[in-house]
Image: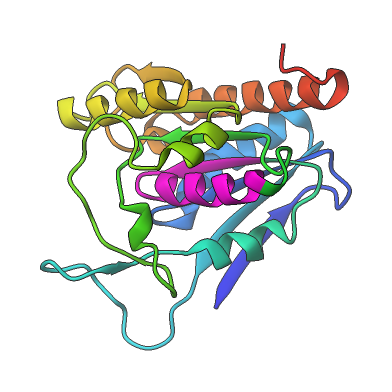
Amino acid sequence: MGCVHRSGATNAPATVVYLQRGDLRSWHPITTGLHARLGGGIAQISYHRHEPGPRRTNRGNGPQYRPGPADIDEVVAAAAGSIILVATGPMCALAQSWAAARCRGDAQAVSGIVMLNPQSWTPGALRAGGEVGPQPRSGGTTFAAPEVAVLREIPTWVMAGAAAGATARGYASGLAASLWADYITVPESGTAVEVSHPSRVVDTILTALDVAYRSHRYGSPT
């Protein structure tokens, strides 16, 4: 079962949805910072899944449990207005997969995606129940051309820590290039930009919200 944490007005003009890779508390500096900047003018939703029974780990080469598309559907059901997805690590692949599927039928379903230190997971391995299998990191994207075409229409920002390592930075920059996304390198940050530099993440989310607002009001993000 999943637990959805929501704050902000029920009829907010926009909702920021957070998909975390670890402790839910890692979003706290960002959610409170965004609230301070906007005075609660938007909604924010973070999701945490509670698994019954013994805790599952990813020791060895076995698959690791991660949220699946149905989990995002559950979260978005509580959203209002324009939707901005903020994801970290391997959650970025899930966010892209879900957004591509939703926007294929409704181009306005997702107004923006912010990815923090993205990691690669094979989209085809997103099986029922949300299990995914790891694949080697590389530049670019593993999505097929139709999905890439849809994702390129969604304003996207990719943030990577300068100290995350050459492989991680190479994957992030390659992904940004393939999706025509803005690429942001955060100095003195490693693989957890949301923890080391929450203010930079808040600034990027504010940019995404501004683009969504302009697109909604004027029909163009510029």
Tell me where residue 51 appears, x and y as whole percent. 43, 79
Position of residue 164 relative to residue 184, above or below, is below
Is residue 88 one of those drawn in magenta? Answer: yes
User: Main SS of the magenta segment?
Assistant: helix
How far across and down, in percent of the image, does residue 13 sit? 84, 38
Location of residue 164 with respect to 131 vertically, above or below: above
Foreground residue among 136 and 204: 136
Q: Which residues are magenta?
A: 84-104
Which residue is found at the position 47% from the left and 64% from the top?
Answer: 68
Quick check: 163 left or right of 46? left
Q: Residue at x 40, y 42 (%)?
A: 144
Image quarter where the C terminus lies is: top right
Residue 65 coordinates in the image, percent (x, y): 34, 69
Q: Quadrant of residue 177?
A: top left
- Tell which of 189 and 212 is nearer to you: 212
In the image, taking residue 197 as reference, residue 151 lies left or right, namely right
Residue farthest to the front, as pictured: 146
Tell me the quarter of the image containing the N terminus: bottom right
Q: Residue at point 73% right, 27% down?
A: 212
Q: Is residue 6 magenta?
A: no
Q: Which residue is outermost to the bottom?
A: 53
Q: Give residue 175's quadrant in the image.
A: top left
Task: Answer with left or right where residue 190 lies relative to residue 29.
Answer: left
